[in-house]
Amino acid sequence: MECEMAGSREARLAALRGRIAAIEAGTRTPTPVLPFGDPTIDGCFPGGGLPLGAWHEVVGAGLEGETGAAPAAFIGLLLRPLAATGVVVWVARRTDLFVPGLFGLGFPAQRLIQVRARDEAEVLSVLEDALSTAGVSAAVGEAQAPDLTAGRRLQLACEKRGGLGLLLHRRPYGGRAGEGPRTVSGSASFSRWRVGPQPSGAPPDDIGLGPPRWRVELERCRGGRSGGWILEAQEAGHGPHPFRLVSQLADHDVASAEPGWRKAG
């Protein structure tokens, strides 16, 4: 028994030395990413895009912290490319996810699995199980911020299958008025986003409404930098990326005139 334990310990040490040597030599396998298709945004991430095999936090701006409508639409559009490679699991305590709205944004509803959870702990538990399951390309959980232990468990689940995890902060069901999402200092998430609605621009033919828009702020990114943008939905089939960059935000205002928006992809 002692020989087996010694051998196992030596094997782990050898593997660890190999990983360290690979990193120092610059030969570590790059982490797969989900790019936005515009260098202004992708350049904020150390790998050139939102990393897979990790989980990320999304917070609603203003009243969206309670309703979650704009952040949910943003998440649905963000995950549209991943839905082509596997199913997307959405875990929540509420039943107000408007699937026809996601379908209208080009998300394939047949690739969505909805799970109703009893409480916050079950949301996190199901989210962890989903991210550890083969065939799941991404999983979304509506909950408050997990503690550091639960956050590390989510990260390990993401790394197991290389899936993308998203935690949408929402006030607990039946919570008191004015109660905001609980935050944890030093969260294990890779990035933190704040998303709110933005008025649509005029359509090319000036008839009806233009594509949906979001005011998006990347508040924190591990190893990267923050940023803020106005993003517009891009129809499925009009390029590999679901968003167009309309303009950047500077001091919480639009930095450039709308006619100068740039196309992502």
Image: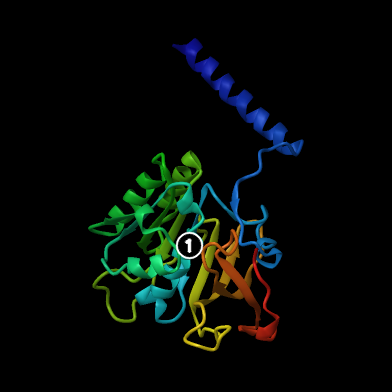
Where does residue 27 sit, x and y in percent of width and height? 73, 36
- Identity of the residue drawn at 68% across and 34% down: 20
Left or right of 238? Residue 63 is left
Of residues 88 and 166, the one nearer the viewer is: 88
- The secondary structure type at the circle numbered 1 is strand
**Image position, residue 210 (x, y; %):** 51, 82
Query: Residue 164, can we see it?
Result: no
The residue sitting at 51% across, 85% down in the picture is 199
Q: How many numbered tags mark residues here?
A: 1
Which one is nearer the viewer's eye here, 108 or 226?
Answer: 108
Mark 1 highlights which residue? 57
User: Residue 60's quadrant in the figure?
Assistant: bottom left
Q: Residue furthest bottom?
A: 206
For the point 43% across and 61% down, the residue is 107
Spot occupied by residue 224 in the image (x, y as percentages of width and height): 66, 60
Residue beneath the point at 35% across and 54% down: 110
Using the image as rendered, state which of residue 100 and residue 176 is in the foreground: 100
Q: Which quadrant: the N terminus?
A: top left
Q: Specify the color scheme.
A: rainbow
Amino acid bearing label 1: Glu
How far across and down, in percent of the image, does residue 237 sit?
Answer: 54, 62
- Crowd class of label 1 (few under 14; some 14 to 19; many from 20; radius 10 Å): many
Q: Residue furthest front?
A: 205
Camera sees residue 83: yes
